[in-house]
Image (spheres, rainbow, N blue to C red):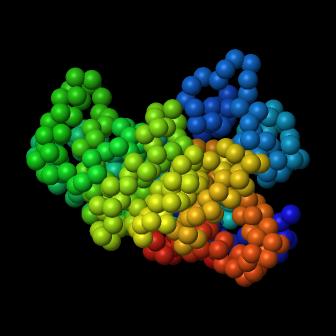
Amino acid sequence: MAHPDIVDALDDLALIDHHVHGTLRVELDREALEEVMTESDRPRRAGTTNFDSQFGLALRKFCAPLLGLAEFASPEDYVAARQGLGAREVNRRLLSAARLGALVIDTGFAAGNLTDLAETAELSGAPTYEIVRLEAVAEDVMREGVASADFADRVRDRLEAARRGGAVGTKSIAAYRYGLDLPAARPAESDVTAAMDEWQRECDASGRVRISHPVLLSFLMWSGVDLGTPLQIHIGYGDSDINMVRANPALLTDFLKASESSGAAVTLLHCYPYHREAAYLSQMFPHVFFDVGEAINYSGLQSHQIIRESLEIGPFSKQLYSSDGWGPAELHFLGARLWRNGMARVLSEWVDEGGCTRADALRIAGLIGRDNAAALYGLETLR
Ligand SMILES: [Zn+2]
């Protein structure tokens, strides 16, 4: 059992959610809520409900009371209460209940439907910071039209402008577009130009702009490294665009060796089911950090196991907290609730076994929940 004083200390710890997105501005009916309760973009199998999941159980237990319902309210009552309060009030209640010290927000995906940096700050009561999605920058440059030889400079200029505008890092979703088995070495400018020619032809032929060329994806990662701010890399768990075999962070080993002396940190995001590989890499390389966000939400009652595994060989100074909340604010809130619960449970066991002192346990929670991220991204946070 978790010690009450450790539970209280974790509840008081204003977490830095270092990988998160905005919340949905639109009202969600039953079907719309079902759709965003899973990472799958496929239609649900007939006769099933996504409430029959760890996320469904956690939502009914922990979110229902915040909407004025009893624990384990029915899905019908939950949706009715959600609609009665309205999306904005639901977002405010759930985000503020997450008790965050700061949010580091990836603004690069489906941004139009989501609360932006300022709105998310207002709803959560915590400062927000921007992460720039590298592929989104490259696709914007392509849409605007650019000579292949000018592409690299244009992207670098955009990133530099974003950094000067306050962005605290960049993010690569190469795992979604190709895989992590990219060229590890920094591509030559002439290779970038040649790859850009190929991408240009592909865009002309398909009529859509979607970057997936391995040389260009590698160039983008190196552009993130060159900026000097932390480079976040999507690892493991994600929607069905992912080929899970090629989302293993061990595939980045040569890239991590090559970028080791750059001065920029690399943060491996979510990582499940490769959190053990990520933990290993974080121990090997001084500039590598990782988190186990997202999987915590979808593993609910079993999330303490993933948290426990993340604490096996990953140095405590190399781990971060994230919810990877995207869309429904239930994800932002539950990420924090379940992480606090799991950490309190595991750390209390360590104290009970005589393996560490209460002060050690609380210091470890503080490092992972807040202090590592504050130092890494250079954030002003609530305490
Ligand atoms: Zn993510």
Which residue is at the front of the view, 7 or 352? 352
Is residue 80 visible in the rendered structure shown here?
no
Image location of residue 8, percent across then percent down = 79, 72
Locate residue 53: give its quadrant: top right
At x 63%, y 44%, the residue is: 328
Which residue is at the front of the view, 97 or 249? 249
Image location of residue 194, percent across then percent down = 13, 40
Seen in the picture, residue 175 relative to 120 is either above or below; the reply is above
Q: Quadrant of the N terminus?
A: bottom right
Is residue 193 visible in the rendered structure shown here?
yes
Image location of residue 81, percent across then percent down = 79, 41
At x 41%, y 42%, the residue is: 175
At x 38%, y 55%, the residue is: 253
At x 73%, y 27%, the residue is: 49
Q: Quadrant of the C terminus?
A: bottom right
On screen, residue 291 versus residue 65, left or right, reads left
Seen in the picture, residue 364 relative to 148 is either above or below; the reply is below
Locate residue 11: give its quadrant: bottom right
Count of numbered circles on the image: 0
